[in-house]
Amino acid sequence: MRDKDLAILRLDRPSGRPDASFATVRTIERRDPVTAVGFPGAADEMGGIAAITEATMTAGIVSRVLPPPENSGRAAQLVQISAAINPGNSGGPLFDAYGRVIGVNTSKALIPVPAVEGNGITLQRVPSGEGIGWAVVSDEILPFLDRLGIEYEGSTSRPGALMRLWHREPLMVTVLVLLSLLTMTAIAVATTRRGRILVKEGLTRGFAPSRMLPREPPPRGPESTGKAVLRGIRGPYAGISIPLANGQPVAIGRDPAMVQLVLPRDQPGVSKRHATVAYDADSESFRLEDCWSSNGTFLTGGARVTPGQVRILKPGDGFYLGAPEVSFEVGPE
């Protein structure tokens, strides 16, 4: 590729480095960040032995993208960059912010200047301006790779908003993706009847206090001597008093993992976590709450307790779960 001042090198053995990916000139815009990589002689002289294997990296931006050559004397399309390049950088890659090769560093603005060396005068090239360099765009290389049958990865479009955000804030993108998946899962679950039941049970399970009573109904025996009790009127707990500690709700239902007062599984009208009852010593009242049960919680007079809302009970008030066959009463010992 003499006309383009480019060459493709063949290695005698694998380099052990990952393959480079390319991006065409269509992916480039002015002010895009770029990184030039190479082995400038001036840096190698100061770097010693380490400079032989460790490349120099300089950062800059795309200053402008020159149009494809016509009859201007240029053989290849160039991109102007502000990244510092010097003799020794020629042939090195120019990377974009995503690690893709967008060009090959080729030249910078230089002018010849006379310099005295020993007894003679020589011409040395010095920069004619700062931050003015050029690289041949990758588009000039890819056709030759195709012709030689060399496989490569190439991009012809600019990264989307999500990829740019991933490059800057990968953790944020990960969190957003997880939240989106959870949201879609919740919506999918909530749109089915079975899903709504699972969501309801999951919420009530999450707020279930630690178990304070045995999983099976306690045997009949002497009543507790506590100041406030939940007394069974009809059903499995008829005639039994369950003490209520101040401010500690007791959950009633069929699932031992979710409640403290467990009802037998042969009570189909009672939900796994049906309702909660708590005693408030300051007001000497009781707090009843329906946990979104399937068949409802009712006061003895027949009024239904609104799910999720606390209903205040006075000593002597009663309620039942689903049907009057499972009823309780609150009051003092």
Image (spheres, grey):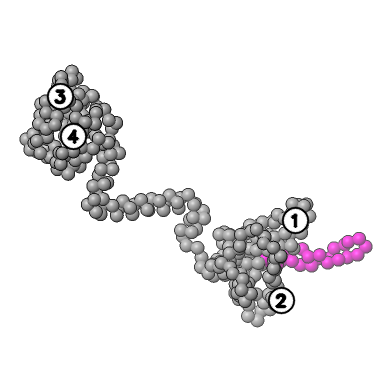
Q: Which residue is mark 1?
A: 52
Q: Which residue is mark 4?
A: 263
Q: Nearer the viewer, mark 1 or mark 3?
A: 3
The residue at 58%/62% (across/down) is: 100
CA gap, disc 1 and disc 3: 90 Å
**Magenta region, mostly helix, strand or loop?**
strand
Mark 4, secondary structure of its residue: loop
Q: Amino acid at mark 3?
A: Arg
The residue at 69%/56% (across/down) is: 56
In the depicted structure, whether residue 186 falls above or below residue 5: above
Q: Are marks 4 and 1 in contact (CB under 8 Å)?
A: no
How many numbered marks appear?
Answer: 4
CA gap, disc 4 and disc 3: 14 Å
Say whether residue 123 is visible.
Answer: yes
Q: Quadrant of the C terminus?
A: top left
First in residue order: circle 1 vs circle 3: 1
Q: Picture coordinates of residue 281 (x, y %)?
A: 21, 23
CA gap, disc 1 and disc 2: 27 Å
First in residue order: circle 4 vs circle 1: 1
Q: Nearer the viewer, mark 1 or mark 2?
A: 1
Q: Which one is in front, 204 or 25?
A: 204
Q: Which residue is mark 2?
A: 2
Q: Quadrant of the N terminus?
A: bottom right
First in residue order: circle 3 vs circle 2: 2
CA gap, disc 4 and disc 1: 80 Å
In the depicted structure, whether residue 93 falls above or below residue 238: below
In the depicted structure, whether residue 212 falls above or below residue 123: above
Q: Amino acid at mark 4?
A: Leu
Is residue 119 within the magenta segment?
A: yes
Q: Which residue is mark 3?
A: 220
